[in-house]
Amino acid sequence: MKKLNLAIIGQGRSGRNIHGLHYLSENNKYFNVAYVVEEDEARRTRAAGEYVGATVLEDYRQLFDKNDIDLVVNASYSDMHFETTRNLLQQGFNVMVEKPMARSRYECDTLIKTAKDNGVGFFVFQQAFYSDFYLNARNIIKRGVLGDIKQIDITYSGFSRRWDWQTLQKRVAGGLYNTGPHPVGLALGFLDFDENIRVAFSSLNRALTFGDGDDCAKVILTAPGKPFVDVEVNSNDAYPAATLKILGSRGTLRSTLGEYELTYITDGENPDRPVVETFLQNEQGDPVFCSEQLIKHTESGSFDPGAVFTIATAKLYEEVYYALTEGRTPSVTAEMGARVIEVIDRVHTENPLDVKF
């Protein structure tokens, strides 16, 4: 199997600690790092020592005259994603862009069209779709043990403060653009990317941030005949709930990135109860509350909590490799990424925050 040559733009947290970590691990079976682009001199020097044999460049435009690149990974600042990606696609490069894909649905559609017009591949790095906790939840829903799914809660929250570029609206940042593509994307996934998905409720606010972007967000999505999905991305939650909770007509799934537990009932094991239109009473005629001991079933299991950044990343890169070499359609498409941004952009439109920087 021949490895493809790759260029990565950016050696920040994502570019180095997620993508770079993958490139230098045994999980990287498909790509060779041929070029690293980084505007900061100290990071360029560090990259030259870490990616042995790679050419280190200061500006991504220096890639334009290279003819030995099979894929460019755009892990630049979020506000650079659209313009940098469009320029690369216009130059005939296959591109994978970090999340957020762009600022708006219009920009996303522009990138998709540009890729099509230039006959190149275009991918979005949303590795959460390949994570164990999400795939396990999808499998449990498919098994039917939870019955009809009524509600899904997805929480990507914590208790912390930020004051870096990821807090600034002008940099396409704030919690919903930065962290939100993961839970919003999974929410759309649980709703099967139904064409009729709508934002039933949304709220953006500031709590602990020192910037002017949001760090307190709630989004409720639904579609006809589907459950509603409640998404929270908050920095002021000192007692965050499970990353994922799914409530069905027969039971509940609770899951974090590292473990899950499931409680459910099955048909026929608990007899139906006739409805009493007045009050229930005991043998002495005293009113009593509805109470019974249900026959319940439980399951539990665990995952590697770090796999969302390792194994899931490896799966995504594997699909990109086969998309480029064999024309396979990846599980996560650019159109899916555009749907994610469409929701986030809609929420920002409905809840404008004043710009301070």
Image (cartoon, rainbow, N blue to C red):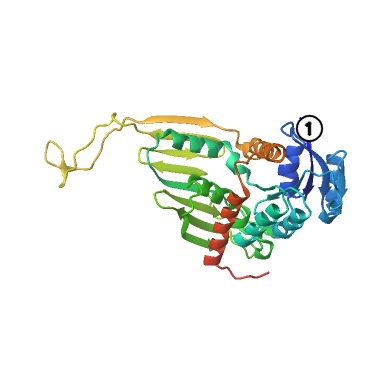
Q: Residues within 10 Å of mark 1 (few under 14, many from 20)?
A: few
Q: Picture coordinates of residue 238 (x, y %)?
A: 54, 50
Residue 185, percent across and down? 56, 49
Coordinates of residue 237 in the picture (x, y in percent): 53, 52
235 sits to left or right of 171: left
Is residue 312 in view? yes
Count of numbered circles in the view: 1
Q: Position of residue 355 (x, y in %)?
A: 63, 70
Say what amino acid the circle numbered 1 marks.
Lys
Quarter of the picture containing the N terminus is top right
The quarter holding residue 149 reads top left
Residue 39 seen in render = no
Image quarter of the C terminus: bottom right
Label 1 SS: loop
Q: Name the foreground residue: 18 vs 288.
A: 18
To which quarter of the image does residue 48 belong?
A: top right
The correct choice, above or below, for 203 with respect to 305 in the image is below
Q: Residue at x 82, y 54 (%)?
A: 60
Name the one closer to the observer, 10 or 233.
Answer: 10
Which of the pair 76/298 is nearer the observer? 76
What residue lies at 40% left-to-right and 35% top-to-bottom?
A: 144
**Which residue corresponds to mark 1?**
2
Residue at position x 41%, y 48% from top? 226
